[in-house]
Amino acid sequence: MLAYKQYLPCNLLPLNLTDNQTMQILFKCLGAAQTVTGSKYILDIDNFRLMVDCGLFQGLKELRLRNRELFPVEPDTIDAIVLTHAHIDHIGYLPRLYKQGFRGTVYCTEATADLIPMMLKDSAKLQEEEATYAAKKGYSKHSMPLPLYTVKDVEDVLPLIAGVPVRTDFDLRDNISLRYEDAGHIVGAASLILTVQGEYQQKKIVFSGDLGSSRDPLLNPPTLLEEADCLIVESTYGGRVVPTADVLEALAQEIESAFAEDGCLLIPAFALGRTQNMLYYIKKIFQTRRLKPFPVYVDSPMAIEATCLYAKHLALDEQSKHCDANDLFHFPSLHYCLEVAESKRINDIRSGAVIISASGMATGGRIVHHLYNRLHRPQDTVLFVGYQAEGTRGKRLLAGETEIKMLGEYVPVKCRIRELPYFSAHADHDGLMHWLGAFQSAPKMTFITHGEKESAKALKNAIETQLHWHNVIIPEYMESFILFDRI
């Protein structure tokens, strides 16, 4: 194994081995490097090029601009892609990569395979709508603003998707096998165990994926793994401990406070994961008679479809907490808004209702229109229940900005802005350390990704001081490493 100071950048060209009995494994970080978005990694294993995750950069403009840059690896040299889960920052670049020449197989869990068409088509529609609106309003610097990809591009890439079972070994090629284990986070999310058999040695490369909270009411906790020669671990909440509380009581109090102002409660929520949690908790509030039933509007076609798929896969999974999940999210005062006309009518509701809409960071989707219509109303309340990345509208609203630009205009912020920090889909610092502590011995190399700089540094420090692991690395964007020189 190469010592840390001997790690050398590599250009990820096809390998030219010096003999027929050894191979190198090389690693390149193309995203989620000191940020929580754009997850993409390349592994060159002998003459096989594997990509792990294919995410879109979101948030800060300097990150989003990377989506339009020439891809740093020739897409037609990528033999296969394996995905950890269906969030856009992990799958959203797939249509763009296809347009540039990728034609390999895309492997994922069966639940993720069900979710991908919905997620990518929604992403494409949002981009098409934003480009059209920008052209109409004239606020783009381009005379003819174009989307990153279209719905047609999404349809082209979907035949490459192959769903595989969780907790089952399968071969990517003769000497490389893959196994998915539960990661929590969202339905279908998984950690990856890649086993590479060389001429003399076997190596295990583990990608944590996005690890979920063990307190999630719907999903199994992340599976604890015991062995890795090389580990790539997320650090979204490195250094941050999510407070514990009576979640039902905290949410009920926020609803009561919002209604006491004679207004509505607007919840920006990720369509996949957070919306389902909100529906589950609101139903529990009604069942426990903590509050009398009130109208709840889910205004996101993707969230509605995701809710159906959530129930389907929770019911199919024999190890799920909720094998009989068909009625998990439904109650009489719940209204699903599919059509645009229904969405617009919500603007006429002045008080006593909860409106749940995507996206969770207020970067796009119908939530933008609801914010546009309600931020100026002192009676209304906006409640954030999820992580807000740097540069997003959600982060800026929580920071106290008094006006927010959206739809080409500056909108004054006069409503109440609130946050409940109890609903994270990510393991917090303690959860990450619990998962890492299950390894029976230290990996030879540990890469900390998918976290802002301070979060990654906090996790690195904890790993080194508490677990006493060595070779703990926070890679930079586009940085390359030789993982194993000869196996």
Image (cartoon, rainbow, N blue to C red):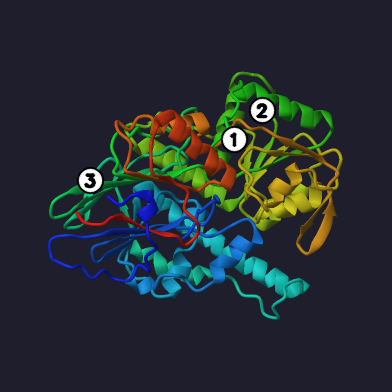
As measured in the structure, the alpha-carbon distance from the residue carrying label 1 to the one carrying label 2 is 9 Å
Q: Secondary structure at mark 2?
A: helix
- Marks 1/2 in contact by CB < 8 Å: the verdict is no
Name the mark on residue 278: 1
How many C-alpha atoms fall within 10 Å of the one at disc 2: few (<14), some, or many (≥20)?
some
Residue designated by label 3: 169
Q: Residue at x 75, y 50 (%)?
A: 371
Report the label total. 3
Q: For this rendering, which residue is in front, 94 or 230?
A: 230
Name the mark on residue 251: 2
Q: Is residue 205 above or below residue 278?
A: below
Residue 218 seen in the figure: no
Residue type highlighted by circle 2: Leu
Residue type highlighted by circle 3: Asp
Quadrant in the rendering for residue 283: top right
Quadrant that contains the C terminus: bottom left
As measured in the structure, the alpha-carbon distance from the residue carrying label 3 to the one carrying label 2 is 41 Å
As measured in the structure, the alpha-carbon distance from the residue carrying label 1 to the one carrying label 3 is 34 Å
75 relative to 133 in the view: left or right: left
First of labels 3, 2 by sequence position: 3
Q: Nearer the viewer, mark 1 or mark 3?
A: 3
Residue type highlighted by circle 1: Met
Q: Position of residue 82 (x, y in %)?
A: 35, 55
Q: Residue at x 63, y 41 (%)?
A: 335
Q: Secondary structure at mark 3?
A: strand
